[in-house]
Image: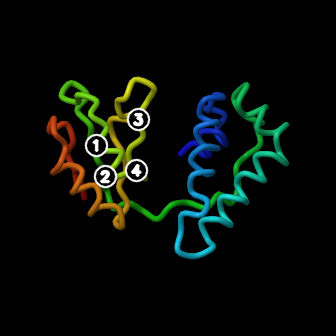
């Protein structure tokens, strides 16, 4: 998500640092070498292309069209919805579904609607069921 914001020129320095932190945390976390290799690739790209990254962080991007970006598989319309008026900021949702929900600086989810890929539905459903404030809902649309 942070890299997509960066590519679109919609990221600020805090988003970039969050991305670096998340990618760094992914290293040495997999059963195989793929997460490590991907993390090293992203961190190296951010360093090698630091001037380009600065252009994207400081403005609306470089103006070049984005071609060939690898899209995520379709999510079939499932999404996790956060009711901020019910949310108490417990943070349990990020423990149960760290790849879906990110907390902002005040401890609340950063988005009210989060797309859920098919392989993430189990974690999303578990998160909805265990939210102490009942602030989450898994919505399916056709």
Real-space CA distance between mark 1 and mark 4, rounded to the nearest whole angstrom: 10 Å
Kindly indicate the quadrant of the structure image that contains residue 131.
Answer: top left
Residue 92 badge: 1
Position of 141 with respect to 41 (left or right) is left
Which color scheme did the rendering employ for the protein?
A: rainbow
Give the camera-side residue of 9 and 92.
Answer: 92
Say whether marks 4 and 2 touch (CB < 8 Å): yes
Mark nearer the N terminus (1 vs 3): 1
The answer to whether residue 85 is above or below residue 25 is above
Position of 120 with respect to 72 (left or right) is left
Tell me the SS state at disc 1: helix
x 23%, y 28%: residue: 88
Residue 115's spot in the image, x, y percent? Answer: 37, 50
Badge 2, how many Cα within 10 Å: few under 14, some, many 20+? Answer: some
**Residue marked by disc 4:** 98
Tell me the SS state at disc 4: loop
């Amino acid at each position: 998500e942070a890299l997509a914001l960066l590519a679109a020129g919609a990221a600020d320095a805090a988003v970039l640092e969050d991305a670096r932190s998340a990618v760094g945390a992914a290293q040495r976390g997999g059963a195989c070498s793929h997460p490590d290799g991907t993390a090293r690739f992203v961190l190296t790209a951010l360093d090698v292309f630091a001037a380009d990254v600065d252009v994207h962080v400081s403005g609306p991007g470089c103006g070049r069209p984005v071609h060939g970006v690898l899209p995520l598989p379709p999510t079939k319309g499932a999404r996790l919805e956060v009711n901020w008026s019910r949310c108490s900021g417990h943070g349990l949702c990020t423990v149960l579904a760290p790849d879906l929900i990110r907390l902002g600086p005040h401890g609340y989810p950063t988005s009210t609607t989060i797309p859920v890929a098919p392989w993430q539905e189990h974690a999303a459903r578990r998160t909805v069921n265990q939210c102490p404030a009942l602030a989450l809902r898994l919505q399916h649309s056709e």
